[in-house]
Image (tube, grey):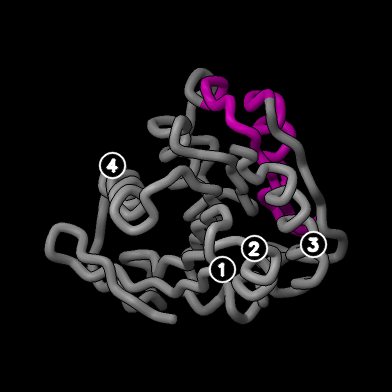
Amino acid sequence: MEKEFDYNGNELRYLFKTSGAGDDVILMHGYHFKAETWEESNTINILSDAGFNTYSLDMPGYPNSKSRFDLDDDGMVDLIEKFRRNVIGSNIHLLGASASGYYALLYAMKHQDKLKSLVLVAPADTMNLSDEKLEKIKVDVLLIYGSEDGLIRDADRLKELMENSKIEIIKGTHHACYLEKPTEFNEILKEFLMDHISTG
């Protein structure tokens, strides 16, 4: 289903598929994509079938998004937190791909107490984040890269700095590994999230 969330007078469009009492997952697409990308990869359906409530944000200011407003870094973090608090109301699993992976990291630096886990798919601009800030992220992190993605050069640094992180490489894929090999991507993602389901 599709809905809109009012953020300071701006309309954030999002897709969602809920399964009831399961954990909540927010998906944030890459810069040249849109909320429907996670439908194209079948990720929304796979996670819903596994019992997760899944929310795909149409990221504001991205060229193919219908959420037609711009935010700076602090605004993006505030948007994610207000969406979590007002729409979901509980702690979340957060996935960010590429440019959105950068914002997911910024969110984790400020609100990791609201995260059950963090998934970063070839996060961009990570060299702009200091070692000291990355070392403060203690939540469990899954890093996913395509083997042919140039950003894989950043993977070892991120894994070393975020002590509770692990890396998964999808062979033969590039930056949008979730579209090139969606079955493999979704299986990796689902297994990680299932290992981090709330027990209380």
- Read off the magenta span: 134-163
Q: Pointer 4: what residue?
A: 74
Counting residues from the start of the chain, the first of labels 1 and 2 encountered is: 1
Q: Amino acid at mark 3?
A: Glu
Picture residue at 68% right of the left edge, 23% below the top: 163
Q: Mark 1 and 3 residues: CB-CB less than 8 Å, in contact? A: no
Residue 98 seen? no
Q: Quadrant of residue 166?
A: top right
Q: Pointer 1: what residue?
A: 19
Q: Mark 4 and 1 residues: CB-CB less than 8 Å, in contact? A: no
- Cα separation, mark 1 vs mark 3, equals 18 Å
Q: Mark 3 and 4 residues: CB-CB less than 8 Å, in contact? A: no
Label 3: which secondary element: helix
Marks 4, 2: nearer the viewer: 2
Q: Is residue 126 above or below residue 173?
A: above
Q: Is residue 148 magenta?
A: yes
Counting residues from the start of the chain, the first of labels 3 and 2 encountered is: 2
Q: Pointer 2: what residue?
A: 51
Q: Amino acid at mark 4?
A: Asp
Q: Which of the pair 153/191 is nearer the observer?
A: 191
Counting residues from the start of the chain, the first of labels 4 and 2 encountered is: 2
Q: Quadrant of the N terminus?
A: bottom left
On residue 187, which mark appears? 3
- Cα separation, mark 3 vs mark 2, equals 14 Å
Where residue 154 appears, as percent x and y from the top left, is 67, 39
Q: Residues within 10 Å of mark 3 (few under 14, many from 20)?
A: some
Q: Is residue 70 magenta?
A: no
- Cα separation, mark 4 vs mark 1, equals 31 Å
Q: Amino acid at mark 2?
A: Gly
Counting residues from the start of the chain, the first of labels 4 and 1 encountered is: 1
